[in-house]
Amino acid sequence: MSGGGQNVILAIDGGGTSTRSLAIDSNGAVRGRGEGGPSNHILAPWDVVRASIEAAIHKTCKEAGLKAGDVGCISLGTAGIGPNGEGKEVIEDLAREILPADKVMATGDMVIAFHGAVMGDFGVVVNAGTGSVVYGVSPRGASRQVGGWGHILGDEGSAYDIAVRALRAGARHFDGRGPFTTLVDRIPEALEVSDYIQVAFKIYGLNMSREEISVLARAVDEEAKKGDVISRQILRSAGEELALAVAVAIRELGMEEMTVPVSYIGSVFDSGERIVRPFAETIMMRYPRAVVLPPKFPAVIGAFVLGAKEIGWKISESLLMNIKKRLLSR
């Protein structure tokens, strides 16, 4: 089928591990979907970023039966672009090369996360996946990013941070320098090696990437679920770190005395209450009027919202309900 008449927006969420794309028409119907690899152009090689975004776009257009002339706007939010659009030009140029469209716009992944999760004019959102970043907007339209420094300078509370803390906890126990944790057995199992010595050989010998190491956060969640005290402490600490960044955003944007909506997004929050509870409790201790809520939509819908506003589409409740129904149907 053909989209026809440029009535489709191609919305793209590009993160440090994966890229997600949706083709959504003016009625809120999700016409096509696609995925690719990492698209953080600061941390990933350029050929990888190109391949990731290209794969996501091509798969989406193929499923939706779209040609370039059918797409009214390509709206991207990718890790590596700053909160004020720093670095967006290279991503916009790449998208135009892959699929020429009348309108191409790119912004940071934290911005689309905000517009998807909060779906309002002001508030704060934390995006914690492979990396972590907090982004807030005040009622006056002022914005503030906190964190987002990458895995060397920051990314506290991210999957990578959780994984590294777990690796160190296992090593400390193995040496006798730290308390017992079942991670000493679970991490070798997750890495498919025989013992903790082999963990070191694999991580250093294979020069494992940030993304590959981040996957170990799942093992931490599994052990926390089984009752491992150290794993639970690691997750609690991650939630508290993310809350601290949110608190800074609230303070710096002058929203301390407001009923400010706070939401969250990203794979780290798949741990549920083991992350959400300490996250919410820490925020409420500082700012009791803050309201911590689950995300209304994923970040990729935030990209759609920004694209729709750019080309003059009205974001009605019925449109959003149609999108939600389509997302839940898959």
Image: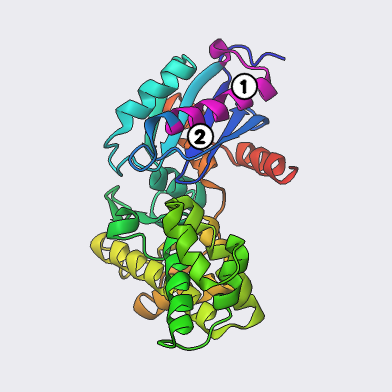
Marked residue nearer the N-terminal end (2 or 1)? 2
Quick check: 115 left or right of 83? Answer: right
Closer to the camera, 5 or 75?
75
The residue under label 1 is 61
Q: In terms of image quadrants, where is residue 221?
A: bottom right
Where residue 224 appears, as percent x and y from the top left, is: 59, 77
Q: Is residue 1 above or below residue 288?
A: above
Residues rendered magenta in the picture: 48-70
Q: Secondary structure at mark 1?
A: helix
- Quadrant including the N terminus: top right
At a point 56% along the width and 52% down the height, the residue shown is 296
Where residue 239 appears, as percent x and y from the top left, is: 45, 71
- What number of labels is visible? 2
Q: In terms of image quadrants, where is residue 215?
A: bottom right
Q: Secondary structure at mark 2?
A: strand
Query: Tag 2: residue type?
Result: Ile
Closer to the camera, 35 or 120?
35
Q: What label sits on residue 183 in the rendered view?
A: none
Task: Confirm whether residue 261 shows in the render.
Answer: yes
Where residue 313 appears, as percent x and y from the top left, is: 51, 27
At a point 46% along the width and 59% down the height, the residue shown is 203
* Secondary structure predominantly adopted by residues drawn in magenta: helix
Closer to the camera, 261 or 302?
302
Residue 23 included in the magenta stretch of the image: no
The residue under label 2 is 12
- Quadrant including the C terminus: top right
Where residue 258 appears, as percent x and y from the top left, is: 35, 66
Outermost residue, right direction? 329
Quick check: 314 left or right of 93? Answer: right
Query: Tag 1: residue type?
Result: Cys
Q: Is residue 212 above or below residue 38?
A: below
At a point 54% along the width and 40% down the height, the residue shown is 301
